[in-house]
Image: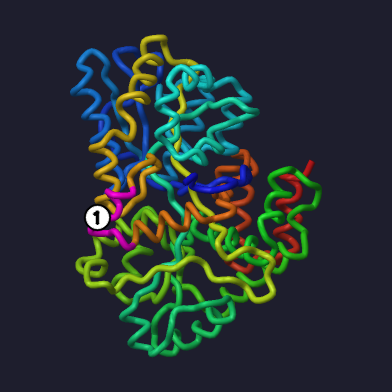
Amino acid sequence: MPLSRRTLLGLAAGVPVSAALAACGSSGPSKSGGGATYWYLSGQPQEGVRAGAVEAFNKAHPKQQVKDTTFQNDAYKTKIKTAIGAGQAPTLIWGWGGGTLRTYVKAGQVEDLTSWFDEHSEVKRRLFPSSFDAATVDGKIYAMPCETVQPIILYYNRKVFDQVGVKPPKSWDDIMALVPKFNAKGIAPFSLGGQSRWTNMMWLEFLFDRIGGPEVFQAVIEGEKNAWSNPHAITALTKVQELVRAHGFIKGFSSITADSNADQALLYTGKAAMMLHGSWSYGIQQADGGDFVSSGALGYMTFPPVEGGKGDPSDTVGNPAQYLSISAKASAEQKKIAKDFFATGVLQDAEVKKWIDNGSVPIRLGTEKALAASKSADFLKFTYDIASKAKVFGQSWDQALSPTAAETLLDNIVKLFQLSISPQQFARNLNEVTGK
C-alpha cells in the first residue's frame, strides 16, 4: 500500500539543527577526490544507523569509500546551504526534499537522477511510492528517498494522566480543558523545545489542517496572493496563541532546544504531560527514558480534530522520507560511488533492521512482518497506519518552502509564540514572501 495518496509539496519539514559540528569522519568539498563525502545529522539512535550503513558499504567496496561527517540539526542547515552556495558541497547531500531541493535544482547544484532510476527500476520499486513526491521537481527525480517515514505524533505520559485523573484529549476543546488541570498540579501541559522553532511549527501545521483542511496550506504552496490571511489560517494562529496565554507550554519553552532532547526528558520524567513531536521521538525516549517506554507509560495518538473544522482527522504532517542528492560539482568518480551507494548501500537488510529496532518505520516496502515481530510492534503499526491511511501527508513546512521563505516563517513563528505579533501581523509578514 502506498504510504499516502497525496503528499503536499508546500512548506517543508525538517527538524532544524543548532550547535556545533560533531565530526564522525572527515569532511570536505566534493572536488576533494579520494572517495565520496557525505554529511548528515548527528544524534542517537539515528546517527548510529546512518554510520552503520556507510561502514557496511565501505567494507563491501574497499575501492569506493564514502567519508562521513555529522552535524547537529540547526548547524547542518546553515552549513549545507553555505557549502552548496560556495560550490563546495559534499558529494551526498542529505535533506528533506521539497522547496529546498527545488532551490538546489533551479541553481543547477544537484544531479538529475531520472535516467538513473529508469535504469535501476528495481531500486525505485522497493521504496514507498509516495516517498518520491518530495524528491521530484518538474517531473524529474533529483533525490534518493531514504531512511524512514516520520509523521508527527501527540505523545503523552500515562502515569501523569492517571495521577491527575484525566483522559487523553479527543478534541481541541479537550486540550484546552486539560491545561488548567495539569497546571493546578504543577505539571506543564505540554513540553516544547521552542528555541528550535520548527517544534512550534508542528502545532500550526496540524491546526491549519484540522481547521481548514489541506487546501489552506496548499494555497500557500501554490503562491496564491494573501493565502496566509485565509480566515481558517487566522483562526489557527489565534488558537495557538490562546494555548500560549493559557500556559499550555512548559515555562521558559523559548529557551529549550530540541537538539539537546531536553523537551523529551520533560515528558518521560513527568514534568510535562504531553508533547507534539516526530515519530523519531519514540526511539529517543526508548534509549534515554529508562523503562518509560518498556513499562507502557508512554502513550501516543494522532492530533485530535478541532470542533467545526473542515480537516480530515486521518490527515497527517511530517516527513514522508529523508533524501539524498548528488552534488553537480562532484567528480565523475564521486558521482559513481554515490550512485553505487544508492543501489547497494541504502536501506539494505541490516539498516532496515536497525531502523525497526529503534522504533522507526523504514520506507522500504515489504517490511510488515519485521515490523510485527519488533518489540515496538504496537508503535510501529500505529505509525505505519497513520502514514498509509492518511488521505493527505503534508510535508513539513520549513522544507517545502524555499529557504528564504522558510527562514521568514520560522522567525515569525517564534514571535507568534512569544505573543509579540498578532495573527494578522504574522499573516501579512508571510504573505510578503510567499504570495506571487
Q: Position of residue 45 (x, y in %)?
A: 27, 49
Which span of residues is magenta-colored?
368-378
Residue 172, image quadrant = bottom right
How many numbered discs sit on the rendered protein?
1
Asked whether 237 or 250 is in front, the reply is 237
Q: Position of residue 310 (x, y in %)?
A: 69, 66
Residue visible at 50% across and 20% down? 118
- Note whether residue 44 is visible: no
Amino acid identity at mark 1: Ser
Magenta residues: mostly which secondary structure?
Answer: helix
Residue visible at 47% across and 22% down? 117
- Residue tagged by mark 1? 374
Specify whether residue 281 is painted magenta.
Answer: no
Specify whether residue 374 is painted magenta.
Answer: yes
Residue visible at 75% across and 50% down? 431
Asked whether 62 or 250 is in front, the reply is 62
Residue 251, image quadrant = bottom left
Residue 405 drawn above or below residue 26: below
Residue 433, image quadrant = top right
Q: In the shown orientation, is residue 314 left or right of residue 336?
A: right
Q: Position of residue 62 (x, y in %)?
A: 20, 16
Asked whether 12 or 356 is in front, the reply is 356
